[in-house]
Amino acid sequence: MTAEIVPGLRALGMNEYAASVYSTLVGLQKATARDIHEVSGVPRGRIYEILNDLTRRGFIAVEEGSPTSYYVLDIDVVFDRLKEDYTRTLDETRETLKSLSVKPRLPPDSFFILRSGWAIENHISSLFRRVKKSMVILCYDPGFLRKHYAAIKPLERKIDLYVVVRKKEDYVDIRLPIYEARGTVLDLLESSPMNESVIGLRKDVCTILVDGRDFLVIAAAGSGRHAVIGSDMPIIGYLQKTIVERLTRS
């Protein structure tokens, strides 16, 4: 048994002994329990227990006789079945969890800080899926729009989308409804939405306002990013409405 195969077999629910027995039998194709014990080095007291479990799970089969022999079932067939079973279980578990989930109602003026890159990207995707009517993106970094362009572009046909930037010429290659900030909206862009002394953020990336109720603020912190998120805050509705009014008026 090569060491490289162990992690893969362990991912299928085998312990080290089971992985050793199975890979040994794959090499031998057909063998008795004694042969497998001698080649694999797995203790004789564990061999039958492991062989019975591998048989029950459909990895190997038994040929009755004196002595009894064991042989490997077609690997492609076995692993295709495992893949189908795993995918089906994953889908069923996802649907069950979705049926149990209830969107939390955040108390007024509450927010959370996300410090994981994966959590930030997951929340961004969630906002793009949940938006119903309107979204305002105050963008400080064109790289954010380029990265998420494929997800943002389809929203233009479904909702009122406003992408607000400091200088339009920095975004000429991005085919989205870009608005150059002026007046009070520009003042908003020029001022940091985050309190640096509290959470230690240095460079703003973007602020997203969704349907007058959800917000997401992303800022760089050293080599990584942090984000502040919140929901059901009355000030978000007022802020989003005011920004749109200023943009459309200008």
Image (cartoon, rainbow, N blue to C red):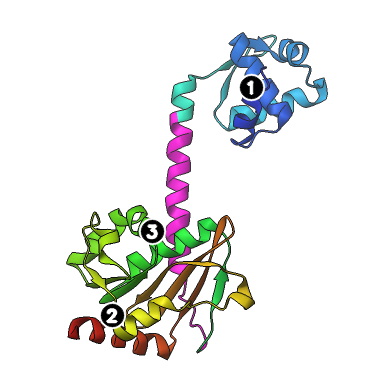
Image coords of residue 29 (percent x, y): 58, 11
Q: Which residue is mark 2?
A: 182
Q: CA distance from mark 2 to mark 3?
A: 21 Å
Of residues 7 and 245, the one drawn nearer to the viewer in this rendering: 245
| Residue ID at (24%, 72%) | 179
Q: Secondary structure at mark 3?
A: helix
| 199 left or right of 152 in image | right
| 148 left or right of 1 in image | left
Q: Nearer the viewer, mark 2 or mark 3?
A: 2
Q: CA distance from mark 2 to mark 1?
A: 69 Å
Q: Which residue is mark 1?
A: 22
Q: Nearer the viewer, mark 2 or mark 1?
A: 2
Of residues 223 and 236, the one drawn nearer to the viewer in this rendering: 223
The C terminus: image quadrant: bottom left
Instruction: Please tell me whether the stretch drawn in magenta is mainly helix, strand or loop.
Output: helix
Closer to the N terminus: mark 2 or mark 1? Answer: 1
The quadrant in which residue 126 appears is: bottom left
Residue 70 visible in image: no
Q: Residues within 10 Å of mark 1 (few under 14, many from 20)?
A: many
| Residue ID at (57%, 32%) | 57
Is residue 92 covered in magenta?
yes
Image vertical order of residue 126 relative to residue 41, above or below: below
Q: Secondary structure at mark 2?
A: loop
Q: Amino acid at mark 3?
A: Phe
Q: Amino acid at mark 1?
A: Tyr
The N terminus: image quadrant: top right
